[in-house]
């Protein structure tokens, strides 16, 4: 994500910068690890401060198995 935020900074002269993600970097595992939560919150804060006009997260399902099936990915 650092690379994306750096690239957004380089493109700041462009009036309409937008990007999207599948949300992988924003997932929380079941441990509810505070270090993980802190990393996610800081990433979100950095994105909010970047000169983005539009940011979207595509989620096909909240159920990981269904999401991967919809993306035609193998489930383990």
Image (cartoon, grey):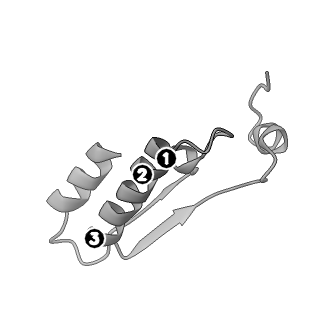
Quarter holding the C terminus? top right
| Number of marks in picture | 3
- Residue 54 picture location, percent across and down: 43, 73
Residue 29, quarter of the rendered image: top right
Residue that mark 1 sits on: 34
- Give the mark nearest the N terminus, 2 or 3: 2
Q: Secondary structure at mark 3?
A: helix
Mark 3 vs mark 1, CA separation in Å:
22 Å
- Give the mark nearest the N terminus, 3 or 1: 1
Residue lying at 31% horizontally and 50% vertically, measured from the top left: 4
Is 9 on the left-hand or right-hand side of 75? left
- Residue 14 picture location, percent across and down: 21, 72
How many neighbours does mark 1 have within 10 angstroms: few (below 14), some (14-19), or many (20 or more)?
few
Asked if labels 2 and 1 touch by Cβ distance under 8 angstroms, the answer is: yes
How many neighbours does mark 2 have within 10 angstroms: few (below 14), some (14-19), or many (20 or more)?
few
Residue lying at 48% horizontally and 43% vertically, measured from the top left: 36
Q: Secondary structure at mark 2?
A: helix
Is 38 on the left-hand or right-hand side of 74? left
Residue that mark 3 sits on: 49
Which mark is in front, 3 or 1?
1
Residue that mark 2 sits on: 38
Mark 1 vs mark 2, CA separation in Å:
6 Å
- Residue 24 picture location, percent across and down: 56, 44
Mark 2 vs mark 3, CA separation in Å:
17 Å
User: In the picture shown, does residue 25 fall above or below 76?
Assistant: below
Residue lying at 42% horizontally and 51% vertically, measured from the top left: 38
Of all residues, the one furthest to the top in this rendering is: 76
Residue lying at 32% horizontally and 69% vertically, measured from the top left: 17
């Amino acid at each position: 994500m650092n690379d994306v935020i750096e690239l957004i900074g380089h493109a700041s002269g462009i009036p309409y910068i937008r990007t999207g993600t599948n949300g992988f970097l924003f997932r929380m595992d079941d441990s509810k690890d505070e270090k993980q939560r802190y990393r996610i919150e800081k990433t979100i804060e950095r994105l909010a401060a970047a000169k983005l006009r539009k940011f979207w997260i595509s989620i096909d399902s909240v159920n990981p198995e269904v999401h991967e099936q919809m993306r035609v990915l193998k489930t383990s």
